[in-house]
Image (cartoon, rainbow, N blue to C red):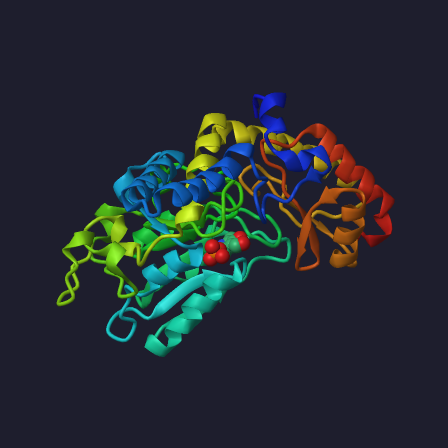
Amino acid sequence: MDAKPIDAIKREKFKVFENRAYLNSCSQGALADEVRAAYELYLDQLEEFGSLWETWVGIQEDVRGKIARVFSTQSDQVAVTTSASAAVNGVASCFDFRNGPSKVITTSLEFPTIGQIWHAQECNGAEVVHVPADPDNRLSAERIAAAIDEDTAIVSVTHVCYRNGAMNDIKAIVEAAHAKGVPVLVDAYQSTGAVPIDFEDLGADFLVGGVLKYMLSSPGVGFALVNNARTSEFIPTSTGWFAARDIFAMDINAFDPAKDARRFEAGTPSVPSLYAAAAGLEFLLDVGVENAWGVSSRLHDQLRAGINEMGGTCATPEGDGEHGPMLAIATTDEYALVNAMATDNVVVSSRDGNVRVSPHFYNSSEDIEKALASLSKNKHLLAT
Ligand SMILES: Cc1ncc(COP(=O)(O)O)c(C=O)c1O
């Protein structure tokens, strides 16, 4: 992929690189000066003005618009939530599993919150079916399609697996589900801001994520993209006054939710996090997700080649369209390896026996070389 390398001035805005090869964006994005300044602005304004509700609502609308731009969609298809989990709970609360289709088809590649939220719906009559991935972490759209039947209420599938970096073919899954009239919810947290996604083109009914990782921002802001045309009959019962059609109607006697995606919101947003999100999203939009993906793909390949050369094993599938930015490397002791790499000032994380190395546009080839040098030094902790 043709990638414009990030310029040195932009990288200097991420102070963590002064001392570390930070390669953990799958967990938390690096902090840019602009994002720090945004948090400070929130506090400065509080000190100066006391309360600023109109400004805060304006920032929420700014964040909504910026999220829409990242996914090439319109603002009225974006609900700004406090986490990805809150967004999924909103969607889950739309279903009447006892009086309609009861099955939730999901996969073995999901983040725990997805499984837990759907299983919580068992008390409302849901039946949760987990479609397993192959031992090489690939999961074919055909296998998901085969699990969908006339009693299926929704397909809930991750785009990129948080444990091993495998990417599912969402378009094929959406096509199969829609052919049977079943809606699809995509958990895109591990690709959001890292991999270009056009929401309309993807075709999903719902897509959830958050701004903490590759969107460079803060805990406290998640989102649901909602295809308004396909989902108007989905009305969440998990709700709150920010989901009302007219927030300032202050009506205690009725439930009158917004017609657009805002109906998936709830209470007062995490205002400090919105300041950070506006700044982080601005930075990301300025770089461009296409560019970011170009850089991280190149670094991912460099890392994979180095691991192969030292005889290690990658848990992440290799083909085009089969992985996100993160490379998961099999270990014999994930915690020992993460700690050993930390002593070499290389920041990574681990899940499920794998060390996760997750480059973003601000990383350089030198960061990958440092990671490989540390991995080579600790080769005895790699699974072969
Ligand atoms: C793939 C994926 N889904 C969901 C979540 C949970 O997001 P939240 O804590 O905002 O609910 C995470 C968090 O790491 C994730 O990686």
Residue 171 appearing in the image: no
Q: Is residue 278 left or right of residue 125?
A: right
Q: Is residue 364 left or right of residue 171?
A: right
Expressed as whole percent of the image width and height from the top left, the position of residue 104 reads: 39, 65
Between 343 and 140, which is closer to the camera in this rendering?
343
Residue at 86% x, 52% y is 380
Expressed as whole percent of the image width and height from the top left, the position of residue 377 reads: 86, 44
Position of 167 relative to 108 (above/below) = above
Between 376 and 28, which is closer to the camera in this rendering?
28
Q: Is residue 253 left or right of residue 382?
A: left
Total tally of numbered discs in the picture: 0
Q: Residue furthest front?
A: 48
Position of 292 relative to 337 (above/below) = above
Q: Is residue 52 left or right of residue 255?
A: right
Q: Residue furthest bottom?
A: 123
Expressed as whole percent of the image width and height from the top left, the position of residue 121 reads: 37, 72
Specify the quadrant of the image occupied by residue 44. top left
Position of 380 relative to 105 (above/below) = above
Q: Quadrant of the N terminus?
A: top right
Specify the quadrant of the image occupied by residue 274. top left
Between 24 and 300, which is closer to the camera in this rendering?
24
Expressed as whole percent of the image width and height from the top left, the position of residue 272 reads: 43, 47
Residue at 31% x, 40% y is 55
Residue 364 appearing in the image: yes
Residue at 63% x, 42% y is 358
